Amino acid sequence: SGDGGATWVEITNLPPTDDDMAAGLFVNSTNAVAVSDQVGGEILLSVDRGASWTNPHSAPDALNAVDSRGALVVVAGDALGANETISRSLDAGVNWADASSVPGAGQNMNDVAIVTATTVVAVGQNGEILRSTDTADNWLNPFTAADNLNAVVASNNTLIAVGDSRT
């Protein structure tokens, strides 16, 4: 929609995929990123406000969340074996790389929030909280909550994570 949601046009010239899309956002005034929640998580990129899309990267497993700040875009998703799926772009979604190091607890990550230009937090299954201070390349597990965490938001270095059983 280009008019605040009053009318809609379905985009049919997508890259070939049967994946269900799980999340999306505008990175800047022209670039948009969408992610799929199926094995081999597809990352789709539009550089023309959604008129056309390419597939610049496929993550190791299903993707559940995406967040951006400036040119940094981070996606998080399910675990492939012992490694959580986290990928990042440093150029508004054009080029992607998988995170170099994740704790390997094998938990699905449900949401991700970019806190500062370099700090990112992801939350997920079994209360796992991951934190990176190097633009989402290397991750540590500073805390584990009692129940699944489903969402995280950040504002001025304050974060709130919410999850199952009123966590």
Image (spheres, rainbow, N blue to C red):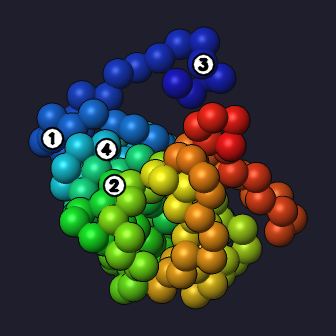
Q: Is residue 140 visible?
A: yes
Report the amino acid beneath label 3: Gly
User: Cβ–Cβ below 8 Å for labels 1 and 3?
Assistant: no
Foreground disc of the pair 3, 4: 4
**In 3D space, how far apart are the residues under numbered discs 2 and 3 (Cα atoms)?**
31 Å
x and y percentages locating residue 99 in the rendered image? 39, 79
Per the image, label 2 sits on a secondary structure element best described as: strand
- Which residue is disc 2 drawn over? 78
Q: How many marks?
A: 4
Per the image, label 3 sits on a secondary structure element best described as: loop
**In 3D space, how far apart are the residues under numbered discs 1 and 3 (Cα atoms)?**
26 Å
Report the amino acid beneath label 1: Thr
Residue extending farthest to the front is 146
- Which residue is disc 4 drawn over? 36
In this view, the residue in front, 120 or 124, is: 124
- Which residue is disc 3 drawn over? 5
- Which residue is disc 1 drawn over? 17
User: Cβ–Cβ below 8 Å for labels 4 and 1?
Assistant: yes
